[in-house]
Image (cartoon, grey):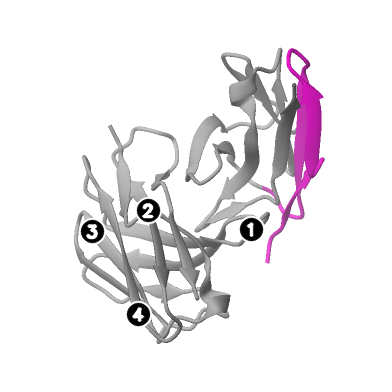
């Protein structure tokens, strides 16, 4: 089946730093989604991307849909404590496939 | 809008007992709901697709006789873990498909999850 690999697996940063993570797929997607999961909660949609090359922002978050349609990137600027959590990319086809996740930790 | 609830939020049970988890779409009708399982430090894995008024569709490797799914109304799907064992301990998350969400794809809204611990 299709796999979505995310890197890095985990990140330890200081508050105020910018964050970059990416997601790569073995197959093409026509839509890319980015979710955040807080501890003990379900995932919440952050950004949806619909077109190759598209760059979309949601506050301090910016995501890009790769030209090859096999990858996507998520950037978080000026991180704050509430950014802590696990970030998942996801690709919807007939079902929703989640990436392996990137765990973000902010060091005090 | 588009709120999905789950009940209970956590449950601890003895090995061999059955546990029922409810998933409700609170402000929209969902003909399709999904059940996911998430083990610690892992991603969400789809277990089954629940369709209102018909049988659920299970993913490969998921035992349909062990994980019973009932989608009896447009706002409620239930997952029953039968004869639970410690290896069934996990975080179970449902989602509901809102075909009228206005997004360019069929958007799934996720519940807050149910943590099951089997002793």
Q: To which residue does mark 4 refer?
A: B18
Q: Which of B47 and B54 is in front in this view?
A: B47
Q: Give the range drawn in magenta.
A: A1-28
**Within-10-Å neighbours for mark 4: few <14, some 14–19, many 20+:** some
**Residue at 75 percent of width and 21 percent of height:** A108
- Mark 3 vs 2: CB contact within 8 A: no
Q: To which residue does mark 1 refer?
A: B40
**Distance CA(mark 3)–CA(mark 2):** 16 Å
Q: Which of B66 and B12 is in front in this view?
A: B12
Q: In this view, does A96 lie to the left or right of B110?
A: right
SS for tag 4? loop
Q: To which residue does mark 2 refer?
A: B9
**Distance CA(mark 4)–CA(mark 2):** 16 Å
In which image quadrant can residue B48 be found? bottom left
Q: Does the magenta stretch include residue B105?
A: no
**Distance CA(mark 4)–CA(mark 1):** 22 Å
What chain does mark 4 sit on? Answer: B
Q: Earlier in the sequence, mark 3 or mark 4?
A: 4
């Amino acid at each position: 089946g299709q796999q979505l690999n995310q890197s890095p697996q985990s990140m330890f940063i200081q508050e105020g730093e910018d964050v970059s993570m990416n997601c790569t797929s073995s197959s093409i997607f026509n839509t890319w989604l980015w979710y955040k999961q807080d501890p003990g909660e379900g995932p919440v949609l952050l950004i949806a991307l619909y077109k190759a090359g598209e760059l979309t922002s949601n506050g301090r978050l910016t995501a890009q849909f790769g030209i090859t349609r096999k990858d996507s990137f998520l950037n978080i600027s000026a991180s704050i404590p509430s950014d802590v959590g696990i970030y998942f990319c996801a690709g919807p086809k007939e079902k929703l496939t989640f990436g392996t996740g990137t765990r973000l930790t902010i060091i005090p | 809008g588009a709120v999905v609830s789950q009940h209970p939020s956590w449950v601890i049970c003895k090995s061999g007992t059955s546990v029922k988890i409810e998933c409700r779409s609170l402000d929209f009708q969902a003909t399709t709901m999904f059940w996911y399982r998430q083990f610690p430090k892992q991603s969400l894995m789809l277990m089954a697709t629940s369709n209102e008024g018909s049988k659920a569709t299970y993913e490969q490797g998921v035992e349909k006789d062990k994980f019973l799914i009932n989608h009896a109304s447009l706002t409620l799907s239930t997952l029953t873990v039968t004869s639970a064992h410690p290896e069934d301990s996990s975080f179970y998350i449902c989602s509901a498909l809102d075909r009228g969400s206005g997004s360019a794809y069929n958007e799934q809204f996720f519940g807050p999850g149910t943590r099951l611990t089997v002793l």
